[in-house]
C-alpha cells in the first residue's frame, strides 16, 4: 500500500468517508490557541526520549529542509465531523526520521510535540505507517502559517488531531501517555473508520488510566 490509496483510487467499492463524516470543500483552519510565529534562528526539530543511541537528534530548519522529500496523497478527517479528501502532502516521511534517529527496541509509543506545548501520542505502529509524513507542503505549495508552517504531521488513517501543526519534536516512549486532546476527552487511538472519537469509547487496553 502506498500513496495510491487516495480518494480517486477508492471510488469503487470502498467508502470515501468514515462513518459520521461529511465532505468538506475548501480547507478550514482548526486548532486550539494562537498561530505561532516562525523564528528560523530559534527553530529546531528534535528527536529525544528513548533513542537507540541514548542521544538527542536535532535538525535546524535548513537541515530539516534538506532531508529526503516524499509525497503522500491522503485524506484529513476532523473529529468535529468534516473530512477533506485527496490532498497531496509533501515533506519528510516519519520513516525517514525513524531511520535517521532510531528508537530503542523497547519503544512502544511516541509523543509528537508542537509549539506552545501541544502534543499528541501515537502508537509506534501508527507512527511507522508508510503514509505518516511530516508535511512541509500541500499540493506543491509550502504550508501557510495557520495550517502548520513550517512542519505538521499528517497521519491519514487517524483523526486529524493526531497530526500536530507546528511540530517541533518527537519523544520516543517506552509506555503510553496521553497528549493534549487525549487528556481532554478524545480517544487515545482515534481511528475514524472505527469512529473512535471520545475517551468514554475506549476499551480496556486502548489507553492509559486517566
Ligand atoms: N498544534 C496543533 N495542531 C493541531 C491542532 C491544534 O489544536 N494544535 N488541531 C488538530 C485538529 S483537531 C485538526 S482537525 C487539524 C486541522 O488542520 P487544518 O487547520 O490545517 O485544517 O489540525 C490538528 N493539529
Ligand atoms: Mo479536528
Image (spheres, rainbow, N blue to C red):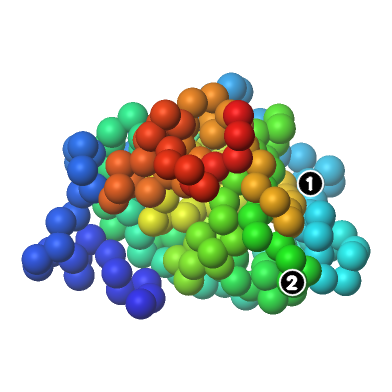
Residue 23 percent coordinates (x, y): 20, 41
Tell me what residue is drawn at x 65 percent, y 60 percent.
Answer: 108
Q: Give the label, 2 or 1, closer to the camera.
A: 2
Tell me what residue is drawn at x 9 percent, y 67 percent.
Answer: 12
Q: Mark 2 and mark 1: span between their CA atoms? A: 29 Å
The quadrant in which residue 145 appears is top right
Residue 67 percent coordinates (x, y): 68, 71
Depicted 174 relative to depicted 102: above or below: above
Residue 26 percent coordinates (x, y): 28, 39
Check residue 105 in the rendering and tell me which mark sits there, or answer none: 2
Q: Secondary structure at mark 2?
A: loop
State the quadrant of the N terminus: bottom left
Q: Earlier in the sequence, mark 2 or mark 1?
A: 1
Q: Is residue 117 left or right of residue 88?
A: right
Q: Tally the numbered discs.
A: 2
Q: Secondary structure at mark 1?
A: loop
Amino acid at each position: 500500500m502506498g500513496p495510491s490509496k487516495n480518494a480517486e483510487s477508492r471510488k469503487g467499492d470502498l467508502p470515501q468517508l468514515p462513518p459520521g463524516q461529511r465532505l468538506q470543500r475548501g480547507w478550514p483552519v482548526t486548532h486550539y490557541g494562537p498561530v505561532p510565529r516562525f523564528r528560523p534562528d530559534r527553530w529546531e526539530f528534535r528527536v529525544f526520549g528513548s533513542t537507540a543511541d541514548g542521544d538527542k537528534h536535532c535538525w535546524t530548519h535548513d537541515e530539516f529542509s534538506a532531508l529526503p522529500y516524499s509525497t503522500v496523497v491522503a485524506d484529513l478527517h476532523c473529529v468535529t465531523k468534516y473530512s477533506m479528501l485527496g490532498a497531496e502532502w509533501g515533506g519528510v516521511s516519519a520513516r525517514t526520521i525513524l531511520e535517521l534517529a532510531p528508537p530503542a527496541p523497547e519503544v512502544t509509543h511516541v509523543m509528537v510535540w508542537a509549539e506552545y506545548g501541544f502534543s499528541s501520542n501515537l502508537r509506534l505502529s501508527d507512527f511507522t505507517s508508510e503514509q505518516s509524513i511530516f508535511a512541509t507542503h500541500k499540493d506543491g505549495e509550502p504550508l501557510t502559517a495557520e495550517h502548520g508552517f513550517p512542519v505538521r504531521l499528517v497521519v491519514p488513517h487517524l483523526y486529524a488531531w493526531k497530526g500536530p501543526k507546528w511540530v517541533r519534536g518527537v519523544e520516543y516512549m517506552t509506555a503510553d501517555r496521553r497528549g493534549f486532546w487525549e487528556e481532554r476527552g478524545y480517544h487515545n487511538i482515534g481511528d475514524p473508520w472505527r469512529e473512535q472519537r471520545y475517551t468514554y469509547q475506549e476499551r480496556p487496553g486502548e489507553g492509559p488510566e486517566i
